[in-house]
Image: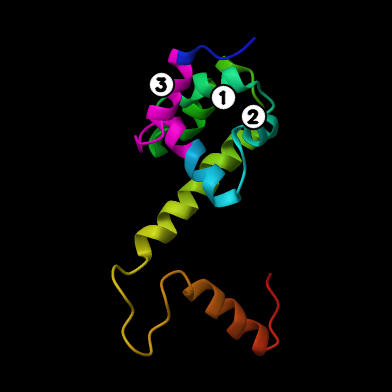
Amino acid sequence: MSTPEWLARAARRSQSEPGMMGHVFEQYRQSEGRSEEDLAKELGCSHDVLHRMALCRRPGESRFEEQVTAIATRFEVALLPLVQVLRRVEVIEALAAEAPVGTPEEGEPEAGTSMRVAARDRAKDGETAS
């Protein structure tokens, strides 16, 4: 059974709304280089269910556990992969928010390189991650 056209359009539209799960799914797909089919498989659901979940509001931090559990239960998807997608996008957004706007001054690293520089510095010192 194919996804109704109205549902596919609504899911695409939700991608531009930061408070919607569609936005989360799109950010995740872009960062991980995955297709909608890949994401549906990762979450253990059909393409149709993925589109329906996209229309849900994104869980708020104050009631995250309750809200993400409700979504997983309602759509019969595994909770852990759904939480991992949400948390991954939160990290991506947090890092993007910390990135400086504009071009770096001479001698400053480019946006998004601070973590790589820190990891490289630790490796030079012979430290291992714990």
Q: Please identify the quadrant where the N terminus is shown.
A: top right
Q: Position of residue 45 (x, y in %)?
A: 66, 23
Marked residue nearer the N-terminal end (1 or 2): 2
Quickly name the residue at label 3: 10
Q: CA distance from mark 2 to mark 3?
A: 17 Å
Q: Which image quadrant is residue 62 in?
A: top left
Magenta stretch mostly in which secondary structure?
helix
Quickly name the residue at label 1: 50
Residue at 56% x, 24% y: name it.
Answer: 50
Residue at 41% x, 34% y: name it.
Answer: 15
Placement of 126 over or under 13, stated as above or below: below
Local SS, label 3: helix
Residue type beneath disc 1: Leu
Residue at 60% x, 49% y: name it.
Answer: 32
Q: Are marks 1 and 2 in contact (CB under 8 Å)?
A: yes
Quickly name the residue at label 2: 40
In the image, taking residue 101 as reference, residue 95 lies left or right, namely right
